[in-house]
Image (tube, rainbow, N blue to C red):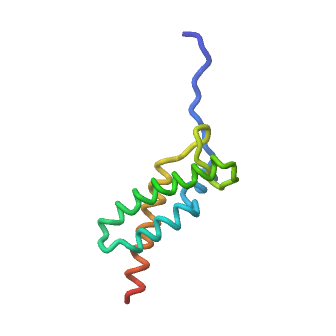
């Protein structure tokens, strides 16, 4: 039992913010939120935006193109932050369309 102590990984706040404000996620989530015709569909838009944006960012990272919040096996993906960010941006798109209609 005398091994090295296990330490929890520490991710800087800047990395969390970059994941929440990823431009690909923002663009996709806002667009899908804009297209939603009911607020309940914002949740579906957020899930779709999350999946599509992570796939696109993963390909960008795989190609070796530098990205603000890369997705790879050896870097933190920060799923909860990306999911919350996708929901917030989809809701913002939904709300913006409602305001634009007035």
Question: Is 58 drawn above or below residue 91 in the view shown?
Answer: above
Residue at the bottom extreme? 102
Rendered-image quadrant of the N terminus: top right
Q: Position of residue 18 (x, y in %)?
A: 60, 56
At x 63% / y 49%, what residue is drawn? 61
Q: Quadrant of residue 92?
A: bottom left
Residue 32 vertical placement versus 3 (above, below): below
How far across and how far down the image is residue 85, in percent? 48, 59
Residue 64 at x, y percent in the picture: 69, 48
Seen at 41% across and 80% down, the residue is 97
Q: Quadrant of the C terminus?
A: bottom left
From the top left corner, tell me how far across and down residue 50 is, in percent: 46, 56
Above or below residue 5? Residue 54 is below
Query: Image quadrant of residue 39?
Result: bottom left
Compare residues 19 and 70 and report the one nearer the observer.
Answer: 70
Residue 53 in the image: above or below residue 3 = below
Q: Residue at x 35, y 71 (%)?
A: 36
């Amino acid at each position: 039992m005398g091994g090295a102590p296990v330490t929890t990984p520490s991710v800087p706040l800047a990395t969390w913010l970059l994941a929440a404000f990823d431009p690909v996620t923002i663009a996709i989530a806002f667009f899908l939120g804009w297209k939603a015709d009911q607020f309940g569909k914002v949740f579906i838009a957020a899930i779709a935006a999350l999946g599509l944006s992570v796939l696109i960012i993963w390909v960008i990272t795989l190609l070796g193109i530098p990205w603000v919040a890369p997705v790879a096996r050896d870097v933190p993906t920060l799923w909860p932050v990306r999911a919350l960010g996708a929901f917030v941006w989809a809701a913002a798109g939904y709300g913006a369309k409602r305001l634009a209609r007035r």
